[in-house]
Amino acid sequence: ETDLSDAIYTMQVKLRGCDSAASSLQQLVSYQKRQLTDLQHEKNRLKVLSEYESLHAQSELKSLQAQVEAAQVERERKISMLKDAEKCRSIFIDKEEKLKEELECIRMELFMLNMQLENTGDGYDDDDELEEKNQKKVVFMDRRHSSV
């Protein structure tokens, strides 16, 4: 009977060892399940975060592209305005040169007329009258050429 009770006792000790191992294994499986669940949650969180950051980056990129396009349009507009202003400036310089030439011609004509008057004796007794007459001619000539 002692052999039987020793065998039972041995079996009970082995059974407790198996129970302990099973319990440890069950704890390990539970821990692994929690780890797996945590990893799945972290994966999902990172996926959502990555999608959000991607959308945000795309939105920011589109905004920057729109700003660049607007800046390019504004640059082209200003270049066009500068070209137009340069054309106008060139036209005004040409007109100014022509007007200067005309004014010089008129001055020369006036000088020649004055010389003719002095040489022919115009009948004016007073130099002031002659000067007044010449001023009227200059004003008349200026009005005539300013309308050109």
Image (cartoon, rainbow, N blue to C red):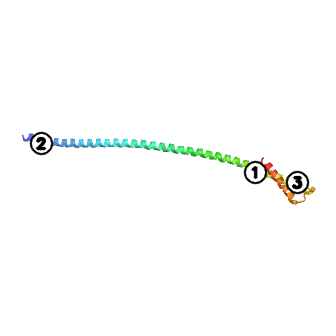
The residue carrying pointer 3 sits among few (fewer than 14), some (14 to 19) or many (20 or more) residues within 10 Å by Cα, namely few
Q: Along the polypeptide, which appears first: circle 2 or circle 3?
A: 2
Residue type, label 2: Tyr
Question: How crowded is the residue under tag 1: few (<14 C-alpha within 10 Å), some, or many (20+)?
Answer: few
> What distance separates the C-alpha of mark 1 from that of mark 2?
127 Å
> Element under label 3?
helix
**Secondary structure at numbered mark 1:** helix
Horizontal relation, residue 62 to residue 86: left or right: left
What's the amino acid at mark 1? Answer: Glu
**Which disc number belongs to residue 96?**
1
Residue 126: x, y in percent?
88, 60
- Residue drawn 88% across and 54% down? 113
Who is closer to the viewer here, 9 or 97? 97
Specify the label residue 9 is tagged with.
2
At x 83% / y 53%, what residue is drawn?
136
- CB atoms at circles 2 and 3 under 8 Å apart? no
The one nearer the camera, 63 or 104, is 104
First reached walking from the N terminus: tag 3 or tag 1 = 1
- Residue 69's disc is none
Q: CA distance from mark 2 to mark 3?
A: 152 Å
Where is residue 62? Give x, y as percent. 51, 42
